[in-house]
Image (cartoon, coloured by chain):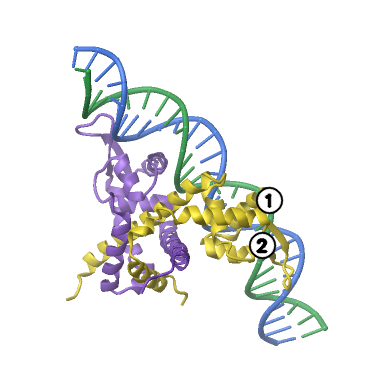
Chain colours: A purple, B yellow, C green, D blue
Amino acid sequence: MTTPPEAQAIAERELCGLVNGLAHRIADHVRRRAVALGLTAAQATALREMTGPMTMRELAERMSCEPSNATFVIDKLEKQGLVERRAHPTDRRAKHLVLTAEGSALRERLLELLTRDSPLAVLTPEQQRALQGLLEKTVARP
Amino acid sequence: MTTPPEAQAIAERELCGLVNGLAHRIADHVRRRAVALGLTAAQATALREMTGPMTMRELAERMSCEPSNATFVIDKLEKQGLVERRAHPTDRRAKHLVLTAEGSALRERLLELLTRDSPLAVLTPEQQRALQGLLEKTVARP
DNA sequence: TTAGAAATATTCTAGCTATAATTATTATGG
DNA sequence: CCATAATAATTATAGCTAGAATATTTCTAA
């Protein structure tokens, strides 16, 4: 059972729209929860991805954005006293991002809020694993 | 085989990152192809979604953005003579967006470019259908 | 019918984002 | 060792985006 090239192309375009749609839903979800904590969506996303000390570039990778954008967002979080830019232990070019006590506490509250009514909650754990597997294929580095 | 709530929450956050990552890959792909045609990524996305005459709101829905943003993007496309805002046949509040001959031709060229090296091409048609099914569940309107 | 609610599009504003250029530092090849 | 390339972060800029407020038109219920 083969698929005609044109139908295949149309299906791929629809898939692009679906991926974009879900990404927007997630961003909206983050935004709504973020405002309750005095954060913007971008700030909350950065906080969510701060699973531990990391460099600016690593954070940008995790946020799927350019490093210049990470600079912008971390500037805001640093002004709020949630994150600190420290010297990197081994590379003087890099910065070592670490959460302050307040930042860490706020992150916990954020994560707790984000688990409520997540757009992904409509999927069973099994379906989520299936989705994860498919997405990892597309995001894999060659 | 049950999943502990904490592990489940972590998996969901990673899934958010993956969805965001793929959405960015697609946007990057569109951006690269768009500049070859003198378009920005947003303009190309609007063109891609213009499958036929539609209102501003319908376009915004398809682009997963706010109507105010659609106004911004259509302004640009209209200035380039690719789209026209006509009177809606039945609703005087709404605009009827239609592609001009040039807009339609450019759209064809764009779609042709977009099918090359799509980030989704690493998935088989079967996997793409599976992905589509999962995404549709999450984007379904209640 | 008519007053009020809802929908469509736009404007304005604040904030997000990518790109290119710049500085400082590290890594690499001759 | 030194010159060159590569990497990390930042700055400046242009363009994208959401949200609130507004004007117009349509829908709805009393």
Q: How many marks?
A: 2
Instruction: Choose top left, top right, bottom left or bottom right for residue D11.
Output: top left
Could you tell me if the residues under marks 1 and 2 are in contact, i.e. CB atoms within 8 Å? Answer: no
- Which residue is at 25% across, 67% downward? B8
Residue B13, position in %: x, y? Answer: 30, 60
Residue B52: mark in rendering: none
Is B41 located above or below residue A126 in the figure?
Answer: above
Which residue has dot 1 on it? B81
Tell which of A107 and B74 is nearer to you: B74
Tell which of D11 and A10 is nearer to you: A10
From the viewer's perspective, tell me whether residue A55 is left or right of residue B97: left
- Which residue is at 33% across, 62% downward? B123
**Looking at the rendering, in which quadrant would you find the N terminus of chain B?**
bottom left
Other-residue count near label 2 (Cα within 10 Å), few / some / many at <14 / 14–19 / ≥20:
many
Residue B30, position in %: x, y? Answer: 47, 51
Residue B97: mark in rendering: 2
Q: Amino acid at mark 1?
A: Gly
Mark 1 chain: B
Tell which of A80 and A14 is nearer to you: A14
